[in-house]
Structures are given as structure tokens and as C-alpha cells.
Image (cartoon, grey):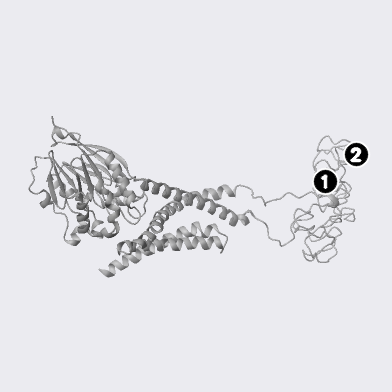
Amino acid sequence: MIIVFALVALAVLAAVAGLHWYVWRRLVRDTTRGPGPARRAGTALFVTGPLLAIAALVSERTGAPFWLQRTLSWPGFLWLALALYLLLAVAAGEAIRPLLHRALTHRPHPTENPAPSRPDGPDENPVRSRLDRTNENSAGVPLDGPGGNPVGAPLDRPSENSAGATLDRPDEISAGVPLDRPSENSAGVPLGRPVENPVGAPLDGPGGNPVGAPLDRPSENSAGATLDRPDENSAGGPLDRPSENPVGAPLDGPGGNPVGAPLGRPSRVVGGRGTGVQGAEPPGAPAVAPAAQDPTRRLVVSRLVAGAAATAALATVGHGTYGVLRGPRVRRVTVPLAKLPRAAHGFRIAVVSDIHLGPILGRGFAQRVVDTVNATRPDLIAVVGDLVDGSVKDLGPAAAPLARLRARHGAYFVTGNHEYFSGAEQWVEEVRHLGLHPLQNARTELPFFDLAGVNDVQGESEGQGPDFGKALGDRDRARACVLLAHQPVQIHEAVRYGVDLQLSGHTHGGQLWPGSLLAAAANPTVAGLDRYGDTQLYVSRGAGAWGPPTRVGAPSDVTVIELAATRA
């Protein structure tokens, strides 16, 4: 049995460690560029948090010094709640992550396809041979003023050339002679590059190919010299810097770029990839693809998702913790009982369960619960277990406000499972000292109905389990009976003994969603009023909280049960 328990414990620890690693990976590793202060701080948090949580649980169960329990409980138990909602938020973010990737992929990156910068100042091209404006012809003369088109012919349509002759077809030149190939001029001579002027002189520089000689290979420069390597200039010499032009003149001074050719990026030189293409990449240079930006996009997406997940988790835990610390709210439920006499119609029972006084919820919280209960002016108060998480020595002062509970027919108490972790016998005596009436497998006859109480099933480990026969065996079944029993699973015995109404707690309503799903699997009713045969069961969500002082989807409450007579 010990081996089985050890294996189960190891499996649980492995699962918890794996889930923490997954959340750490999404929130810390994927959002940082590499080792650094941010990653180290995040890693420290994800190591310290689980260790504090384990230490808080162990210290509470082993009865460690109360000051140590208080020191460990706040950060340790809060980490449990925060880790749960970080996990849920990160898991939900997996559905959003591909949508963000797609949205960012379709947006142009600011570093893709940059427009060539126009030189100004001393780097301005003296012959204005740039062809990057539509209002200049191939010789660099503006066409939008009196000096446009050197022969004075207007260029009213884009189909006219610089001499004013109509180009009947896009493959004809100024004399109307058809160009058998788009790369030939009027003399049929191949044009090495499409940037030559009407007489075939290329615009690469003052001495470039004056008769339009073909540049058959992209490795030839404007003078036809073969560039054996992409790092040689037109004279065969190496280009020591990527900012040198075809004749080796540097472009970073006043004399740079003598022909004004736009160099969009410093790494581009004349004679690159493609025949006669000014500004192309040199042969063998790696192409810049959009995929090169993927690491940056992934980082942006990871940070967006992680930020949203952390914000949602912190807000959820913060709101849920505030809801517990402010104290329970009152809930009112009417329960009709067929055997209840008319004189008891409207009888009010304040049901309080799962206060869980301990290292986190102390005397101040107990006083808020007492004030809330007394404000309802009940006829009877039923405290249905899990009052404390600790010994009388440590928590006696915290429970002292319970002595101020006030009801016309008194306050009654039954044990819960946590009392047996904290010294049940001592606490039974303590609550009796505070003025409450413990019902340990016992019954009392009130004027209008019987009130019974049974011990919690956890008491079986100490030989003090529930005894329905002792509490209910010899009662008058013609009278209505209300049973106090901590756990809802005790309803089946209550049905056997003809109980009319059972009041329970224990489930906390799940406390932390989706804990309600687990609670539903272990209990016949998680919260609220239900019916089993002729017996009704009401389960309170409880006034406090165990472990994390946090509730999500299961607000704390004090329920006022108003009994209603159905017979005339």
C-alpha cells in the first residue's frame, strides 16, 4: 500500500512539474531573446512558487509552528490559484496564437523592400541621370518645364518618345522601326540593359558602352570587362567596401556615385544578379525572404499572448481573493416541508459552513461572518463543519467572535472532515465553551421539528464516525426532521431514516472553477437545493475558503433557509 501511495505521489508531482514547465516555457522562455535578467527572474518565480505551495501544505498538515504556517500560506496558496489560471489562460492562448501569426505575416514588415533614398547635398548626381522620376527622360532632362524634351516636342502621351514620334507599338523606337526584340535598339543592336538612352548610350557612367554594345553576361561591367568574382569592380580589382561603385570610387563622400545611380542598400553593386540590372544583389548573395522575419514575429506573438494570459490570471485571482476577504454574502432559500406545522411557517435557519479559520483567515474574518449571520436575525444557526484548519492553541483566539452569534433557538455545530485534522475533541469542547451546541450523533426536539446532527465520515479514522441509528433511530417520524451533516454524500443514509431536510457544506461549490467539475464527480449535489426521494438536500458553498483564499465561479455565502408549511 505504501508503494502504491508513493507511486501515485510521484505521478502527481511529475504532472505538476510538467504543467509548470509548459507554463514557464510559454510565459518566460518564449518571451525572452535569451538568458538575461528577465528570464532568470521568471525562472526563479516558477521554481519558488511550487516549492512554497508544497511547503504551505506540509506545514499545515504537520502542525508546524503557527508563525511559519502564516509565513508560507499566503504566497504558497496564492501561487496554487495563480498557477491554475495561468495554465488555463496559456492553454486558451494556443487557439489565438496561429491567428496572430497569420495576421502579422500578411502585414509588410518595415524592413522589407525599402525605397531607395534620394541623395541630397554634395552627393546629388551632377548629370541627373536618375530614372526614378516619371518627369525626366533618359538623359536626365526634366520634361515638365520649358527645358523638357530637348527638341521641344511635347510628350502628351506615354506612347511618344523623346523626339515626339509616336510609338505605334511598345516595341518600336523613335523612328517607328519595330524592335524585333525588346532588347534591341533602332539599329538592331541588343541593348544590354533597359536603362540606355535613345541613341543607345547607357547611363551607367560617362564611359559606359557608348554604342549600346551588348552586355551578354551579368558578370561584365559597363566596359565589357569580365568580373571573375562578384567582389571585383570594373577594373578587376576587389571591392574592399560594399559602398564602392563599379569603378571603385567610394560612395560615402561628396564625390560618391558620380552617375547618380540609386544604391538602395550598401550591399548592392552594378552587375549583380540579372543582366544589366542596376542595384541587384551580387551573384551568390542570399535572398532576403519574408520568412527571415519569423523569429521576430514569433517573439511578438508570444509576448502578446503571454501578456494577455498573465493579465487575465492576475485579474481573476485578485477578484476572487477580494471576494473571500470581504466576507460572505447572504443567500435566501425557501424550503417547503410537508410535516411542518403552520405555526413554524417562516422559521429561519442560518446555515454557515466551511469558515476555515487558519493561517490566512483569522479573527477579523470570523467577526465578519458573525456580523453577517446576526444581521439576518435567524431563529436558529447551524454551523455544519470545517470551522477551522489548526489547533485550539493556535486558532482559539481567532474563533472567539463565534461567542457573539445570536439566535432565538441557539446555534448548533457538527464536525467536518477538517476538524479531524485539527483535533476534533478539543474543538468540540471549544465551541461548547463559545456557546454553541455540538450535535455528535445526537438529536434535539425543538417546538416544531426535530434537529439532528451526525459526525463527519472522516471521524471513522478515529472511531468517531457518523451514527445515524443513534441520532435518528428512535424518533417520531410524524414530526419533521432537519439533519445537519457536513458532507452531501451522507444523504443516502438520511433518506433511509426519513429525514425531511439535510443541511450540508463541504464542496465549497467547487471554489475554483473548473473545480466544480471535480466536486460534481465526488458529490451528489455541489451547491443549492436538490431532492432525493422524500428528502431534500441543501448544500452551502461555504463562508470561507481552504488553501488559496480565493473563489472563482463559486462565491461564498451564508444561506438563510426559510421553512414553509404546506399543510393547512
In this rendering, position of residue 16 left or right of residue 342: right
In this rendering, position of residue 541 left or right of residue 134: left
**Residue nearest the observer in this picture, 160 or 137:** 137
Asked which quadrant contains residue 178, the reply is top right
Residue to which mark 1 is pinned = 179
Q: Please give the name of the residue rendered at 30% of the width and 62% of the height, measured from the top-left corner.
A: 61
Asked which quadrant contains residue 278, the reply is bottom right
Farthest residue, direction bottom: 3
Residue to which mark 2 is pinned = 147
Above or below 204: residue 568: above
Farthest residue, direction right: 151
Q: Which amino acid does label 2 sit on?
A: Gly
| Residue 516 in view, yes or no | no
Q: Residues within 10 Å of mark 1 (few under 14, many from 20)?
A: some
**Residue nearest the observer in this picture, 249 or 169:** 249
Q: Where is residue 171 in the image (x, y as percent from the top left)?
A: 80, 43
Q: What residue type is labelled 1?
A: Leu
Q: Position of residue 499 (x, y in %)?
A: 14, 44
